[in-house]
Amino acid sequence: MLTLFRWLLRLTIGLIVLLVAAVILAWYFAVRSLPDYDATLQVQGISAPVEIVRSTENVPHIFGQTDEDVFFALGLAHAQDRLFQMTLLRRAAQGRLAEVYGAGAFPADDLARRLELYRNASASLDSQDQATQAALRAYSDGVNQWIAQVNKGALGRGAPEFFVLPQDIAYWQPADSLAILKLLAAAASNSAAEEILRARLSLTWPERGTDLLVGEGNTPAILLPRYADLFPGARLAPPEARRGPAPDRDATDFLRPGSGLGANGFAAAADRTAAGGALLANDPQAPLVAPSMYYLARLQLTSGGVIGATVPGMPVVFSGRNPQLAWGIAPAAMDDADIAIEEIQPGRADRYRGAGGWTEFATRREVIRVLDEPNRAITLRSSRNGPLVPLLDPGLADVTPLGHVAALRWTGLSGTDTTMSALIGVMRATDTGSAATALGRVVAPAMAVTLAGSDGIRQVTVGAMPQRAANHPTGGAMPVPGWLAEGEWQGLVPVSEDSPTEEGLAFATEERGPLALRRTRLAHLLKDREVHSRDSFIAAQLDVVSPAARALLPLVGADLWFTGEPAAPGTPERQRQDALNLLAEWDGAMSEHLPEPLIYAAWMGALQDRLIRDELGPVADDIRRLHPGFVDSVFRNRSGAGAWCDIVQSAPAEDCTTIARQALDRAILDLTQRYGPDVTSWRWGDAHQARHVHPGLGQIGVLGWIVNLPQAISGGTFTLSSTTMLGTGPNPFEAATGPGYRGVYDLADPDSSVFIISTGQSGHPLSRHYDDLAGLWRRGEYIGMSLDPQLARAAATGIMTLQPAAP
């Protein structure tokens, strides 16, 4: 017995020693991948020495003799801090995520291959101007030199994620940067998703289904034909054919095509500012991932210093300023995509009905490698209307009749896309006129670009605009029969249109709808002051008042506000009274510290679901966002929309007041189960979390606890400080996207301009710069944005010198 005990003791001690050794070894290799920001490197690809001066917040300030050397150093700095993120974005664009994530990433890869993101990016390389081609080559050389340094010095493979998700790190190519831009363009466009939803609603309730989208999009719902009239016999697909929404955020879904990204961009002319110089603010949204999609950088080009937000993988400052000009981007409300439904020839899956008869699909096969599973071959088919995209949207099966397939027309399906040249051209522009000229080369995504310079402020809508026939069957608002000539695009026209400024102000949001809620709120805040300052622009950018709440609560609760005797404590009636009392005094501010935003959000969500559930059935599962225009129309009974309040399955006719009360009771019951019975103790921040998920490690047990960054935040879908919520699953109020970057540019005193990103500059979980900006972002604070080289050097935490290596 004693001998057995001794052997068990020895075995236990041995296992402990092995575990400690494994942890120390893992720590050693992980720490080795932390870059030395004070190093001097001998590198190939530069013409003269280059300095990378890192500020206190790890913002690289890059000084070189030529623009190519500066772009080289930016590529090296991106790779130092975000190499894993860059390779992941590249894989997403190439359709190669399943190689490291397994079968769960196969649908994303399948769609990326069908959209030909990488093929079209590669084809577009020759269409870029010479300066852009030179920048792309230099940037790629910089990335590759850092990969070479990692291999030469055994620097932990460049990032700890590569040990957990093993993969070969291929050298960077100029086409890789263009492919990532294509991926962003695909994510920004939600026109096809809107078409599919309209068609599903039309099939579900032909008379009133599209009420849900009243006023949204480019075509009024009342002018749309019934989808079943376009495709006789069309029926909703059975549940097993429908790819339902994911209950939680997927690691491979952080830039899903068609997700729709947002932003606010606004400016004030010099005569509307206290300091006598133009002001501009911008806050492009992105999926809330760790690290942030954005990376702060300053580039000293021969045309002058440029500073602002970059996306690792591309040599572009998307939103920022130079000494003479500031610019900010937002998605443009342009219908840039259409779905064409193609009829398959019976018995011939390789042929479809064209305008002149049965026609063969253009076909090719590709192989997708899947981790720990056999490779999967896919057949890619294209019609004259575009590639077939069966996995584009979960609801596409509903609107694709038996014997038909769906093809996609999209402006981003271009092999001559010059958007990268346009964006790099803006960085060198000296005034709004030259910037607008450069932006005329944008193809996809369509953008509303706000500009501010010494020559004034300007807002330009740019992108390729599809030209549709006057007799187009749906005006681009719903899928169209692919064989109809009148449903074809008549061409793409490059658009570069100025939006009118109002009283020396310019503003853009991505919000569309009958109430124009966010735009109206922004216009109110800007016009309410005669003179603006940097601080007033910051206040507008951080505004968390929900115009949707202010518009809907008095309407929905008109007959519910409590006026009688209080009910007994602890009863559901008392909870309802307490909730209504709180909402009656609330100003609509979606503060994380208040219970009212949580009550309001849960109530409106339950109300909309109760209104649509019986009429739309399973389609209601995919309606994740509140549609304020719809609720407004229903409760005002516009054009008979009050019919939605009647529950079809019940004998009595319910009115809207009854439905509102039932929805409130349902919401309170759900919140009670989550947060306890005391209504006044609930907090919006307990439910509304910005959970920055690491796309590589965030789903792996204890590693996710280490690398993910959860934060309670204020705001909501319709506030200017906007966060798009999941709307489904166990955490429906969790923020999925948000302002990953905020910048405010003051041209009266440019060095007083400020910016911030949502995490930290480094993508290395062991770096102190992994999350050092996250708390500032959450609290609505910023860091300085200066082009003064002396200030950068005075507060430097590291100065890296790149020396040309001997040939």
Image (cartoon, rainbow, N blue to C red):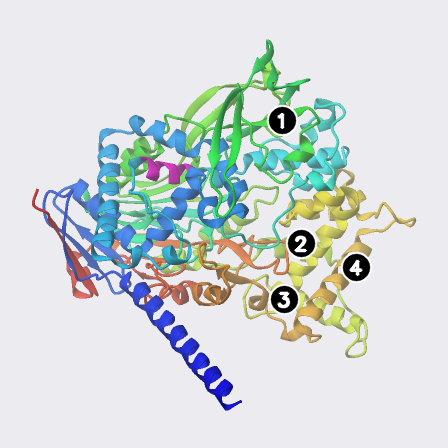
Pointer 2 residue: 552
Reading the chain from its start, which is encountered first: label 2 or label 1? 1
Whole-angstrom CA distance, mark 2 to mark 1, is 40 Å
Ranked by sequence position, the earlier of labels 1 and 3 is 1
Q: Which residue is mark 1?
A: 405
Disc nearest the viewer among 2 and 1? 1
| Percent x, y of residue 327 | 33, 44
**Closer to the N terminus: mark 4 or mark 1?**
1
The picture quadrant where one finds residue 398 is top right
In the image, residue 358 above or below residue 623: above
Residue at (80%, 71%) from the top-left corner?
A: 573
- Distance from disc 2 to disc 3, alpha carbons, whole Å, reads 14 Å
Q: Residue at x 81, y 75 (%)?
A: 565
Q: Nearer the viewer's eye, disc 4 or disc 1?
A: 1
The dominant secondary structure in magenta is helix
The residue sitting at the left extreme is: 806
Residue 92 in the image, given as x and y percentages of width and height? 44, 43
Residue range of the region highlighted in magenta in the rendering? 175-182
Residue kind at label 1, given as amino acid type: Val
Look at label 4 and name its amino acid: Gln
Q: Amino acid at mark 3?
A: Glu
Residue 661 lies, with reference to residue 14, above or below; the image says above
